[in-house]
Amino acid sequence: MSRANSRGAHGSAAVRGTVIETARLALRPLELEDDGFILELLNEPAFLRFIGDKGVRTLDDARSYLLKGPMDSYARHGFGLYAVCLRDGAPAGICGLVRRDGLADPDVGFAFLARYRSRGYAVESAAAVLMHARRELGLRRIVAITSPENCESIAVLEKIGLKFERTIRLAEHGPELKLFGPGRA
């Protein structure tokens, strides 16, 4: 993974372990110490409605989710979901790439705490993840999936240049999802 130097505005401290840096954000690997943040994020109403219930109810559940999800993905694929941090280091959300059963290509995913939504952080971080995936990881095709009724996520995907391709189901009896891809080059 490439590491970017983190120089915050007004001389703020660097966010330790930064993998991707934008004008306002630093994306870093999730760690076990992020358990409280993950517990809060995965139980937000919007997360439960649009992404699903991951069964994370305690700090132990959050650490298990981190180990079996993002941290396992880093080891197996060289990428995963990252903590999206403000310049002061506070995690605002997650954004990164996920390898899913049922999808041939990695997909970009994101979720933010309610208090950090509607500030452009999803667009900023997802666009940076796409650029990193192409330039640093050499991935050619990155897709995204979302619930058909998740208008906010659909707007983010369109702003970062992804286009609706078709509806899919990841599992035979799973929910119908919208698949977005890079469109024609």
Image (cartoon, rainbow, N blue to C red):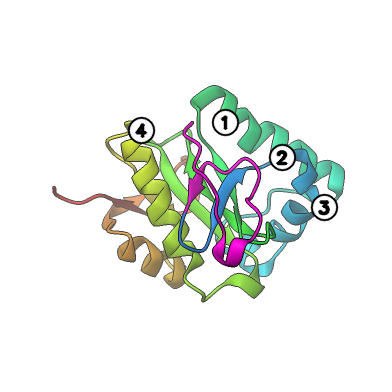
Tell which of 144 and 12 is nearer to you.
12
Residue type at tag 1: Ser
| Image location of residue 78, percent across then percent down | 50, 28
What residue would you read off at disc 1?
A: 73
Answer few, some or many: residues within 10 Å of disc 2's Cα (few below 14, many 20 plus, some between 14 and 19): some
What residue would you read off at disc 3?
A: 57
Residue 7 sits inside the magenta stretch: yes
Answer few, some or many: residues within 10 Å of disc 4's Cα (few below 14, many 20 plus, some between 14 and 19): few
Of badges 4 and 2, the one in the foreground is 2
Q: Is residue 108 left or right of residue 10?
A: left
What residue would you read off at disc 2?
A: 31
Q: Earlier in the sequence, mark 4 or mark 3?
A: 3
Answer few, some or many: residues within 10 Å of disc 3's Cα (few below 14, many 20 plus, some between 14 and 19): few
| Image location of residue 11, percent across then percent down | 61, 61
What residue would you read off at disc 4?
A: 104
Residue shown at 68% from the left, 57% from the top: 89
Give the distance between the C-alpha atoms of the residues marked 3 and 2, in whole angstroms.
18 Å
Give the distance between the C-alpha atoms of the residues marked 4 and 3, in whole angstroms.
31 Å
Dot 2 falls on a residue whose secondary structure is loop
Q: Are marks 3 and 2 in contact (CB under 8 Å)?
A: no
Q: Earlier in the sequence, mark 1 or mark 4?
A: 1
Residue type at tag 2: Glu
Q: Quadrant of residue 72?
A: top right
Residue shown at 42% from the left, 44% from the top: 107
Give the distance between the C-alpha atoms of the residues marked 4 and 2, in whole angstroms.
27 Å
Q: Are marks 2 and 1 in contact (CB under 8 Å)?
A: no
Res. 42 in view: yes
Q: Which residues are magenta?
A: 1-21
